Image (cartoon, helix red, strand yellow):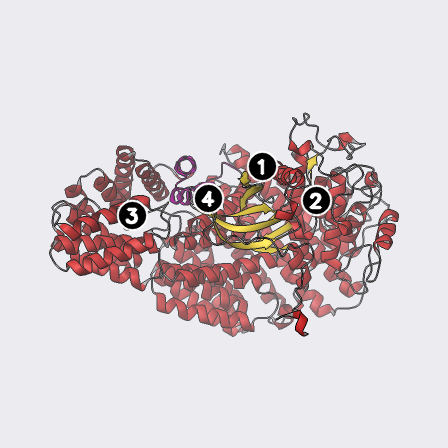
Amino acid sequence: MDPRNGDKKPSRRRTPGALDDTPHLEQGSVIGRYVVLYRAGIGGMGVVYAAYDPELDRKIAVKLVHPKREGAEARTRLLREAQAMARLSHPNVIAVHDVGTFGKQVFLALEFVEGESLADWVKRRGHTWREALRIFEEAGRGLAAAHAAGLVHRDFKPGNVLLGADGRVRVLDFGMARPRHEPGSDVAPKTETKEPSRPPLPPSRLATPVTEDGMVIGTLPYMAPEVPRNQGVDARSDQFSYCVAFYEALYGEHPFASPGDSTLDLIDRLLRGEVKPAPPGSPVPGWLRNVLLRGLSPDPEARYPSMEALLAALRETPHKRRRLAVVAIAAVGMALGGFGLYRYLQNDRPLTECEAGAARIFSTLSESRREGLRDTFLSLGSPFAADAWRIVQDKLEGYAAVWSQQYIEACEETHLRDHQSIELLDRRLQCLDRRRTELDALLTLFARADEKVVEQAVAAVESLARPEGCGDIEVLLASVPRLEDPEVQGEVQWLREELAQAQALAASGRYADALAGGQAVEEKAEELAKTTGDASLLGDALLLNGEMHRWVGDLNEGASDLVEAMWAAEASRNDRLAAEAARQLVLLLGVDQRLFARAHYWVRLGTAKLDRALGDVRELRADLLDATGTLLRMEGRYDEARERHLEAQALYREIGSEDLRFATSLDALAATLGSMGRHDEARERFARALEIHLRELGPDHPLMAKAHNNLGIELRHLGRLEEALEHLQRADELFRQGYGPEHRYVVSSLNNLANTLNQMGRHDEAETRLSEALSIARRNDDPEQLTLTLVNLADTLTQLGRHAEALPLQRQALELDEAKLGPSHPFIADDLQGVATSLLALGRAAEAVPHLERALEIRISVEGDAVELAATRFALARALEASDSDAERARRLAGQARSIYAEDPERFRDELDEVDGWLLRAAKLPLDDWGSDRRELREVSCHPGKKSSPPGNDPDGLP
């Protein structure tokens, strides 16, 4: 409309900092070698596009300088960002892949991260302080890594932190970063000895000033006071900005500014260090506020000497500090002959009755006992024993710290604050006594550990029931009342101790021994339940025995015990026990036996039990979701499986759990993504799982083999073959070292190595590896591994042109798979296509057609990889044409295959050339020689969803 005629122009709302007149690059535009997919966002310094890297077959982010900010300053700033970030390699810093120019602009190729900014996360509110602590700890590790590399970010704020959908936190936008001791307006720290000494940085764009002298750089609300004072910037300035952002996330308000304040008001309070008081009723603990207050000091000298020191303070919770005090008190008490005597803290305060009771945990985990356990671990001479003990000791001390804190809280609630009845205190202390009994049983087993126990030691400690559960009042009040008969109480206590020993054996991988112990408890607990009406102990024993039957291979007995555990859970009104029994049944029936419909019944029942259960059941729910995801993956329902695993991981992150269980969930999700053909996403999850395994286990632990194996597979899919081979060779080394040369895991490892060697064109080496694997699988009488190896050896022989030798192996694999998986599983399509490939190559096209028709029907019915579907369609096209069956349909199928390959012409150039050549020849003259099909070799990923269930991705773990 024309404004001269009185019509108003519609107003255009402008986002602060955004440039609305930025030219929009259309989909398909090329920046360097990167193909634009869509515009992902606009910031103060750049516009970001989602793009595709055809060379490495991955999705990336490309950042461009705004047109209005072109020129030397903008280009220098972006190049500075590239150089700063390229020097960092850390999981909590966004990865930079490449830098270049696009016309007059500079572009930066970055890791593409699905997720949201920390600023958006904070705005949504409703988060707990523990969630904020986890996120900011990760962001802090990213900043600490930058400082260790000699860089200061200078603009840390929530908008420069990404929360990935994978749960990982990444710091980004290092465009203002400079070396810590750069020339210009920034001044070296006065206390250099507080930071690690490093050689001076070489001249680079990082040392090029991008502002005039005296110009303030950064974002005012997060700016350290020394910046407007022009006193210089160092790593402690980043620390101040970090604490401002953390404070906002915790309290929902700025530490210095109030609504309506002017910029001068903010700067005034900032310079004077006037932090506002905490809002009334804030749940943020005082110790955490004190950490932030030190980081918010206006004087840099008063802050922590480094980000590492600040992070250490965040990790040093009151639980740990109180633990150290109680350990010291306990040591003095033992020297004086008992815990009932007076002992003194550092300030000469006598130990209270509650603290004395809490110190009992350190009689269970005494210094002398820990020294003995350490000597036992190290005496075995295993290459991973030292790392295992170091990690186990840390986890045991953390467990004891939480136990002692729970005891003190329970005791003081009754005796100090009078907020809790004696009966409830009694229930809480009974629960803590059971936890201490379970800990004692595990330590007793560790004292006579063999290599198997040491291998499982970290996971065994993590499997202990957490003391925090003893503070779940709602659950405790709903439990069965205390038994009054002292004799019956004593018998129950004795049986609990026996069951704890069996559970310790189970956690350490001694399944047969654990089953024997659990069955002995079950027999006595059944009699006790009849006389007391309390079936809770019986339910716990049945649950253990059902799981152990599963691991020793007696699935029918396992299912029977687990169903009985469900009935015992009903009798004792224990919905948590019922849900865990249901989860075990999902795995036993659905994953082990492929009885999918029956397994889904237990999914529904377990979910219903959790919906009704009292207290915090997030961890149990996450476990059930992961089991359900594995079940769906086994069925080929990959999209649904992915959703269940993502839901599980959201719960793990919500409760702040990133241990081995979380890594297993990441593995399971990655396996599903790999089955869907989303290999770059799968690689990212496997890499994150590898990081957690390395942190939790050390580099030489046998379980590291599974993490290396999984990551190697996805790297192979992405064409990064040298990297894949390196990981797979390390996996093979660790499998043999940890499990012996004849173990089924070695068969998996050899298959994966062979597939990678085949893709590298080293077919003779691949055949050697597979021949060894076939011999081991036959000696072990292992049908699953035998099928796997038959398929891959047949594919290798096909690559070598030895089709007559490949055909009988393919037929045998098809027969074994159909007997186990049924006629419609995705693996059957692989087998059928393998048989048809050899038949085509041998000139027996008419025999190949029905196999390919079946394979195509399966591919269409399953949400699988479109590339596999294309390969099947093209193979069927060739078979139909060669057998003179239906030339028109053959050309139509080939055209459909071509349309899939054409979606990514760079990646599938060879396939497109082959299809185009065939279509051209088929349109003019018949062919006598059809060649061989280009189908993917079968990968051996470590999960039950891709042909085998070797090491690693079964969310329930493997023996």
Residue at image x 21%, y 51%? 919
Q: Is residue 943 a member of the stretch shown in magenta?
A: no
Predominant SS along the magenta part: helix
- Residue carrying label 2: 311
Q: Which is nearer the N-term, disc 3 or disc 2?
A: 2
Task: Tell me the element at label 1.
Answer: helix
Quick one: label 3, few (<14), some, or many (20+) residues within 10 Å? many
Q: Which amino acid type is shown beneath numbered disc 1?
A: Ala
Q: Look at the picture and state if 575 lies above or below 47.
A: below
Where does label 4 land, which residue?
Answer: 707
Label placed on residue 912? 3
Residue 86 disc label: 1
Residue type at numbered disc 4: Ala
Q: Position of residue 297 (x, y in %)?
A: 83, 45
First to last magenta residue range? 699-727
Compute the Cα span from label 4 to label 3. Answer: 35 Å
Gap in Å between the C-alphas at discs 3 and 2? 53 Å
Secondary structure category for the residue under label 2: helix
Q: Which residue is depicted at the point 65% across and 59% down?
A: 120
Distance Cα–Cα, label 3 vs label 1: 36 Å
**Horizontal side, residue 614 vs residue 332: left or right:** left
- Residue reaching furthest front? 4
Residue drawn at the location 57% of the way across and 65% of the way down: 617
Given this view, does label 3 or label 1 mark the residue nearer the observer?
Answer: 3
* In front: label 2 or label 1: 1
